[in-house]
């Protein structure tokens, strides 16, 4: 059985048998296993690359590298359309055989969104880099180094590739591509370390390997579609997209805006620490964030697996299975987050000193608090996916606005009081509001759905029946 044996088109019946459900569960567990294995290997390799950069550059220059990377990644997250969300939301309900033309159009729509987002991200990030010279007095050498990295944003077409792999069940491919990119970055970082390339050298390493990873994703994604029989994507028609996919643009803008607000708090934090404190503090904070990303990525990867299934279950009216999958997923994620927090509490400081050196020992407590914040955040991953599957992206938006307002309202005074640790505490408050808001919104949505369903049944039963 290959990765795609149970793909997007093979669980379509409104009343699947117990055997079909067992196969789907087996596929889901196996997919999560592939993603977690790939993510774990990728994070370990990435941490080695970060350790080499930290040892070669020291706290101050590593802090500058962290600020450059964060600026680029923040613009990419804030300005990209996250095309995988509408592609999965609508593509999961299409049959890849009888509705192939619609599927081709949907993928072309995703590529169009990716192109617009990547161009916008590059332009804004480049302008901000130049503006930093006039506003903050950053030297032209540092600005030029930042502009080198920003070129990598032009190649960001990962949204469509992500949707392709998730909808076709190719989770093993995702894991392999992640590891290949991480290996290439580690090899290039080791070379830069040996040659004493300095800050510009490590910036080039990160930019080149990011471009490599993106190109691999889109090329392998297109090849995957070709094997599935979905070809000539660029020739597909975009005429009548709104009628073929009701509320497509509203869902795209709504879901993207909520994810943009959410990502802003996750991406701009390092820049805020560097602005209110200093580059060295930003470097310490960035190392803690990079290590904690293993927990964050696990939440994202598990959400990636369950989101298509939740969309199909909701569309097919399988409410019990829908609720069961949400509960099971969030229990697993909460347990995983708690275990990671305990591990960071006991071993986090020692691990950072071993990897990056004694100069980065201050990042240990930052890591522990950051992982606690991330554990809160990922515990709501299944609820967020469920609300999107139900078409309740406004509820997600309201929740993320409340969480972001909490973060931005408190991050500056907390940094003034606690230094870089203040940003971690602001993330804990963000995660608390995020988890509580998603839980309440999901309960309200399910309650309203039951009310509507009960009303429809009463109306049907009360309708006059023909005599005789």
Image: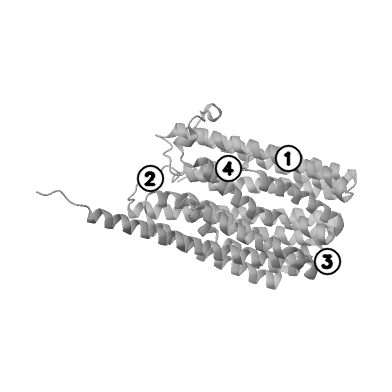
* First reached walking from the N terminus: tag 3 or tag 1: 1
Numbered disc 2: secondary structure: loop
Instruction: Identify whether 214 is placed above or below 322.
Output: above
Query: Marks 3 and 1: which is nearer the front?
Result: 1
Q: Are marks 1 and 2 in contact (CB under 8 Å)?
A: no
Please name whichever residue, 49 or 211, is drawn nearer the observer in this view of the structure: 211
Answer whether residue 160 is visible to the viewer in this image. Answer: yes
Q: Position of residue 101 (x, y in %)?
A: 46, 31
Q: Quadrant of residue 417?
A: bottom right
Count of numbered circles in the view? 4
Please name whichever residue, 349 or 379, is drawn nearer the observer in this view of the structure: 379
Label disc, if present, on residue 12 of the rendered structure: 2
C-alpha separation, residue under disc 3 versus residue under disc 4: 42 Å
Question: In the picture provided, is 230 more to the left or to the right than 361?
Answer: left
* First reached walking from the N terminus: tag 3 or tag 4: 4
* First reached walking from the N terminus: tag 4 or tag 1: 4
Q: Residues within 10 Å of mark 3 (few under 14, many from 20)?
A: some
Q: Position of residue 393 (x, y in %)?
A: 52, 52
Query: Marks 2 and 4: which is nearer the front?
Result: 4
Q: Write down the residue under mark 1.
A: 122
């Amino acid at each position: 059985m290959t990765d795609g044996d149970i793909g997007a088109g093979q669980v379509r019946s409104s009343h699947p048998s117990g055997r079909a459900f067992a196969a789907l569960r087996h596929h889901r567990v196996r997919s999560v296993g592939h993603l977690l294995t790939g993510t774990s290997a990728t994070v370990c390799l990435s941490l080695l690359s970060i350790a080499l950069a930290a040892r070669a550059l020291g706290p101050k220059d590593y802090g500058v590298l962290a600020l450059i990377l964060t600026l680029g990644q923040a613009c990419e997250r804030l300005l990209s359309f996250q095309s995988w969300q509408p592609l999965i939301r609508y593509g999961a309900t299409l049959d890849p055989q009888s509705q192939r033309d619609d599927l081709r159009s949907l993928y072309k729509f995703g590529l169009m969104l990716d192109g617009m987002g990547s161009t916008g991200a590059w332009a804004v990030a480049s302008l901000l880099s130049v503006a930093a010279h006039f506003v903050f007095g950053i030297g032209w050498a540092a600005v030029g180094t930042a502009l080198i990295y920003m070129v990598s944003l032009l190649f960001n077409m990962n949204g469509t590739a992500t949707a392709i792999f998730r909808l076709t069940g190719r989770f093993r491919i995702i894991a392999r591509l992640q590891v290949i990119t991480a290996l290439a970055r580690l090899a290039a970082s080791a070379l830069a370390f040996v040659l004493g390339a300095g800050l510009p050298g490590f910036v080039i390493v990160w930019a080149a390997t990011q471009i490599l990873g993106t190109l691999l994703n889109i090329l392998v994604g297109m090849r995957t579609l070709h094997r599935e029989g979905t070809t000539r994507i660029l020739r597909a028609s975009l005429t009548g997209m709104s009628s073929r996919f009701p509320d497509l643009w509203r869902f795209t803008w709504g879901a993207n805006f909520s994810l943009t607000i959410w990502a802003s708090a996750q991406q701009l934090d390092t820049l805020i620490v560097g602005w209110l404190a200093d580059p060295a503090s930003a470097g310490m904070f960035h190392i803690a964030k990079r290590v904690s990303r293993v927990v964050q990525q696990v939440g994202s990867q598990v959400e990636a697996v369950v989101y298509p299934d939740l969309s199909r279950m909701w569309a097919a009216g399988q409410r019990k299975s829908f609720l069961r999958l949400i509960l099971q997923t969030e229990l697993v994620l909460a347990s995983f987050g708690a275990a990671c927090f305990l591990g960071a509490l006991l071993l986090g400081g020692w691990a950072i000193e071993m990897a990056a050196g004694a100069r980065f020992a201050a990042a240990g407590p930052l890591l522990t608090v950051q992982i606690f914040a991330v554990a809160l955040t990922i515990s709501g991953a299944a609820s967020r996916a469920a609300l999107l599957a139900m078409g309740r992206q406004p509820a997600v938006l309201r929740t993320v606005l409340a969480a972001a307002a909490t973060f931005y309202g408190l991050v500056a005074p907390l940094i003034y009081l606690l230094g870089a640790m203040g940003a971690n505490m602001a993330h804990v408050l963000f995660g608390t509001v995020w988890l509580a808001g998603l839980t309440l919104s999901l309960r309200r949505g399910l309650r309203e759905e039951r009310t509507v369903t009960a009303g429809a049944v009463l109306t049907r039963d009360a309708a006059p029946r023909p005599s005789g």
